[in-house]
Amino acid sequence: MKNFLSLFEVSINKRLLMAALVWSAAGICLLTRTTLLLASQTIGVTIGVFCAGVLLGAGKARMALIPMAQKIIRHNQNQQLAFLGKFFSSRNWLLIFCMVMLGRVLLATPLPVWAKALILATVGFGMLLSCLTLWRAWRQSA
């Protein structure tokens, strides 16, 4: 069994690439969902939600997501070769699961569409801004 798992051991560079790709894809998916939610809203509401999402997302990135990305980078620099799925720690995987579940609950709540879209836009823009930290670390590790 150990020999089979060793097939999935990858370098720091590949783990950082996977982390950056997942982080970027999550941000893009959240912003796509925001756009779909706002399709039925007026242009004023849409522009307001996106502008507020950019500002709030920048704050969220600076206060929470960039430090989390830096922890992911430090986690990946501990071992030269490690299992591909270890680009996030177990704690990060648990946090991701909880965030997905909270997102599902958010979309099921009776909140106004603009409020749901604002929350999704904030997190989406924050993730896109903070993924730059992971992309920079990946580029430097190559």
Image (spheres, helix red, strand yellow):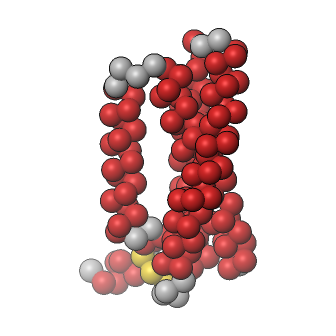
Q: Nearer the viewer, residue 21 or 102?
A: 102
**Quadrant housing residue 5:** bottom left
x%, y% of residue 7?
43, 77
Residue 27 higher or lower than 16, as above or below: above
Residue 10 position, x and y percent, is 51, 78
Q: Nearer the viewer, residue 67 or 91?
A: 67
Q: Position of residue 64 (x, y in %)?
A: 53, 59
Can residue 25 be seen from the camera position used here? no
Residue 52 appears anywhere in the view = yes
Is residue 134 left or right of 71 when viewed as pictured? Answer: right
Q: Residue furthest left?
A: 1
Q: The N terminus lies in which quarter of the figure?
A: bottom left
Q: How many marks?
A: 0
Which residue is at 34% across, 25% downward? Answer: 109
Residue positioned 70% across, 33% down in the render: 51
Residue at image point 40% right, 38% down: 103
State which quarter of the image contains the C terminus.
Answer: bottom right
Residue 38 in the image: above or below residue 20: above
Q: Which residue is located at x 45 percent, y 19 percent?
A: 112
